[in-house]
Image (tube, rainbow, N blue to C red):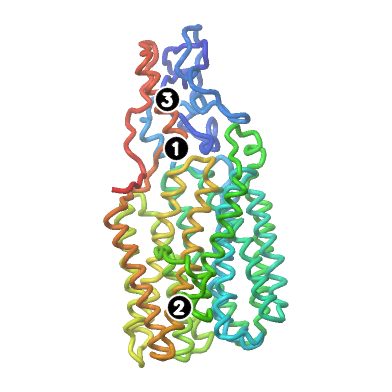
Amino acid sequence: MLPPSGQGGGSVSSQSIQVTNAVPLSPASRRIPTGAKMESDQVSAAPSAPTTPSYASSVSPPEAGQSNTLRALPLPVDESLEARIERLGRQRPEAFDSIWAEIGFIFSISMSQILAEYFVSGFTVVIPTLTADLHISAASSIWPAGAFSLTVASSLLIFGRLADMYGGYPVYVAGQAWLTAWSLVAGFSRNELMLNFCRALQGLGPAAFLPSSIMILGSTYRPGPRKNLVFSIYGACAPFGFYVGIFFAGLTAEYTTWGWYFWIGAILAAITALTSYLTIPRDMQEKRKSAHRPKMDWVGAILMFSGLILFTFAIVDSSHAPQGWKTSFYAGAHRSSFFHGSLGIFMLYATFYMEGIMGISPLRLVAWYTPMALGGCIISTFGGFISHLVPGTVLITIAGTSWIIAPLLFAIAPQNATYWEYIFPSMICATMGIDITFNITNVFITTSLPQQQQGLAGGLIMLLFHLGIAVCLGFADIVNTYTIARLGSRKSYQAVFWLEVACAAVALIILIFFVKITKAKSDLTIEEREELEALEALEAREPKSGNNINPGEGIKEGNTAYLT
């Protein structure tokens, strides 16, 4: 390895090896095993005579609580730098003592996706029963469904920054505990106001644990196939959670009261809170000792939170205002993003169409959604094995095309449409669209940002997802409200699906012509790249004939995406 200041290189022998090359590794990679845990790294440094300071001594010292990453990991003489990076991208992080510890960790983190989807998808199934029991009008029925996503979207970036400040572990566990409490209370709702209040407060739980879950994953795993696979499992839990939600919602709607839908969710959240407390590595001390601890812009956070809520409220409620868009407090809402709202439109209005137009029961609805859930699990997991082999642009194009086909089949379905001819292929295309997009987005954004901004990365990903759902559901409700009297329920729902086709088409055009994402292969982290550039610049200024440092050798361009 690079010797500390005041030591020089030594000769290579069969008994002791002095390695002069070193891979600069970031704080995110401190967990990579060394010594006895890595057979190929079992080398010892021979003592040597003092000489001039090495390059490593000229690099800025590490943050408090961190080892000097430039000296931490020697490069075996029989392994190239590129081969070493590939191997590090495949092995288990040092944070886990065994494979079972890693499995428990992945379970706890993946449950965040299951719970978030549970309270989105399942609620659309219980809405007809719930609105009848609580005497909620048709004009107000969109709010219990939209309040959850609206609260999540409005506070994601705030909780993402809090995770960067204080650690992902406390924010994640607190979010799970909060969701448990308000899910329990929501099951006892007795009127519309109480239900909307509970649904809004429920959303603060996922707003906390969703960005912190991505932060924890992004900080634990370095770029490479193992990270791709773990993020694919994480993404596969979204369709599984979607299915779990509609399954329990169908059971409760058919055989018991809708309150059990919330109480079952509370039980799942409580289990997740317990396992998370036991299996997720603590990172609070590391955050407290960090020399680059981020700060919160509280004024900006409050303005962003209130602005997003008012903006989405203006869109969602405009179709039910006395004078529509002419009402004064709606005049400012003129534009929004359609790129991540297709899923929200599809889930809600596909459920309305199959139950209201095709007349199927809640349990049969669960059966019809089964291919979407199973297909999503398979596609997401399979994507983890090929995302380092296939360019991300190709995968995103496939996803975008699928998103156009999924609502298009509902939009052109005739009155007597059959399941196998229209619904089944639509479900398959829908799961291809969301799961591929979600996986590629997670891997790309977390790899493109440094460790101290992983919480912000998680907040950004989930903001695009949930804000897209909230906003596009508002526009979908506008289309439905203004067309149902003239076209009838079936044609009005199909008009909503045409809106989704347009949103997906715009997103696909942007992705094809303006975004390029390469393969998600093993690579250096952001921190490692910065250290590498510092070493190369230092070597160019002060060439040392006695040191064989060539940090850039064998490194190729890694997973990057940029606007063209």
Q: Nearer the viewer, residue 323 or 237?
A: 323
Q: Nearer the viewer, residue 341 or 220?
A: 341
**Category of crowding for the residue at label 1, using alpha-carbon neighbours closer than 10 angstroms: few (below 14), some (14–19), many (at least 20):** some
Residue at coordinates 59% horizontally, 70% vertically from top-left? 147
Amino acid type shown at disc 2: Ile
Residue 39: give x, y in percent of width and height. Answer: 48, 33
Q: Nearer the viewer, residue 328 or 3?
A: 328
- SS assignment at label 2: helix
Residue 354: give x, y in percent of width and height. Answer: 45, 85
Q: Check whether the beta carbons of the residues at disc 3 and disc 1 lie within 8 A of each other.
A: no
Q: Can the viewer see residue 32?
A: yes
Residue at coordinates 50% horizontally, 58% vertically from top-left? 463
Residue 539: give x, y in percent of width and height. Answer: 37, 18
Residue at image mark 2: 478
In the rendered structure, which disc, 1 or 2, sits on the residue that comes first in sequence? 2
- SS assignment at label 1: helix
In the rendered structure, which disc, 3 or 1, sits on the residue that comes first in sequence? 1
Per the model, the C-alpha gap separating discs 1 and 2 is: 44 Å
In the rendered structure, which disc, 2 or 3, sits on the residue that comes first in sequence? 2
Residue at image mark 3: 534
Residue at image mark 1: 526
Residue 373: give x, y in percent of width and height. Answer: 46, 71
> Position of 24 compared to 499: left or right?
right
